[in-house]
Image (cartoon, rainbow, N blue to C red):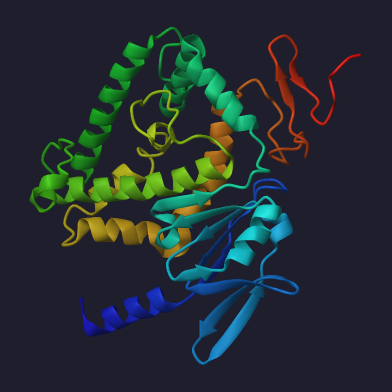
Amino acid sequence: MSSTSARNARQRLAAPTAAMLPRIGDSLSFLYIDIARIVQDDTGVKAFFQLDDEQRRVALPTAALGCLLLGPGVSITSRALSTLARHGTTVICVGSAGICCYAANVPDSLPTRWLELQARAWADDTERAAVARRMYLRRFGETAPANATIAQLRGLEGQRMKALYRLCAQQHGLRPFKRSYAPDDWDGQDPVNRALSAANTCLYGIVHAAINAIGCSPGLGFVHTGTSHSFVYDIADLYKAELTVPLAFSLHAAVDPDGQARRSFRDGLRLFRLLPRIVADIQTLLDPDDGTRREDAEEAAEELVDLWDPDFGRLAGGTNYGHD
């Protein structure tokens, strides 16, 4: 890298970002901030940015903010976090431009509609198979037999990915490609495998953030199982053929393929544009019979917690059910 390129890269990394990301209805909007100090003052939550010799202050719309994504270089006070929690804002710590998801602070007021739908489907083998089938079919489009079993769909998925690898290799004049992941021998892998592993990790980060934002569990997977990120892998698989695989093959001659893959997603906040689509896909997979796509993702949520009854389902909370 030339000295000019290195200087430009440092300037980009040192430039603070405050980006209002695509809105999903009125109650689920995302804001990404990096290289800033976030505090609570007498008038609300503020983010302070240092631009050259000038300090700028931005008021955060906490009452209308569904999810705040904190990138590198952010400090936040406990008072500011308390205010965000009172307004029901999920706070997630992410890598630069969302390429990793490290931790999430979910407010206790976040409705559990999607978590309950996920857990109910996950706990029932028939429903779990139905969701897994929808995931596979979403990847295939209309090319899979309607009566195919999960095992058959899994086999078709393997064939589909092999065909995609073969096509991408032919397009770039490469020898037949075999997918491998060897973290113990990272530098010994070919550039395409390194770029693909790095790009997939970036994709997992933004999917994880979206799952946390709507209150689902990243561990309750339908196709994958046995890890705390099973649902993350389920959802990320929906987009790999479109996003990460073509990118990885385009970097087959790169000197630093994994670094370039991460930068490709980071530049222009590319992954953040996926957020509305990820949320909508999760909702459709968990509740395909709900024909009204939510302008307000939790329009029916009440402030009071409901009570569960095995015969009646939900009962109104805040009510004394003792009878004289």
Q: Residue at x 50, y 47 (%)?
A: 274
Q: Residue at x 16, y 62 (%)?
A: 255
Q: How many marks?
A: 0
Q: Nearer the viewer, residue 205 or 88?
A: 88
The relative height of residue 125 versus residue 113 in the rendered view (above or below) is above
Snapshot quadrant of residue 290: top right
The relative height of residue 130 versus residue 266 in the rendered view (above or below) is above
Residue sticking out furthest to the bottom: 53
Q: Residue at x 72, y 41 (%)?
A: 295
Q: Nearer the viewer, residue 44 or 114?
A: 44
Residue 216: % across, % down: 54, 35
Residue 28: % across, % down: 66, 48
Q: Is residue 305 left or right of residue 160?
A: right
Residue sticking out furthest to the front: 324
Q: Which quarter of the image is occupied by the N terminus?
A: bottom left
Residue 98: % across, % down: 44, 56
Residue 120: % across, % down: 56, 19
Visible in this render: residue 92?
A: yes
The relative height of residue 123 versus residue 176 in the rendered view (above or below) is above
Q: Residue at x 40, y 75 (%)?
A: 12
Visible in this render: residue 189?
A: no
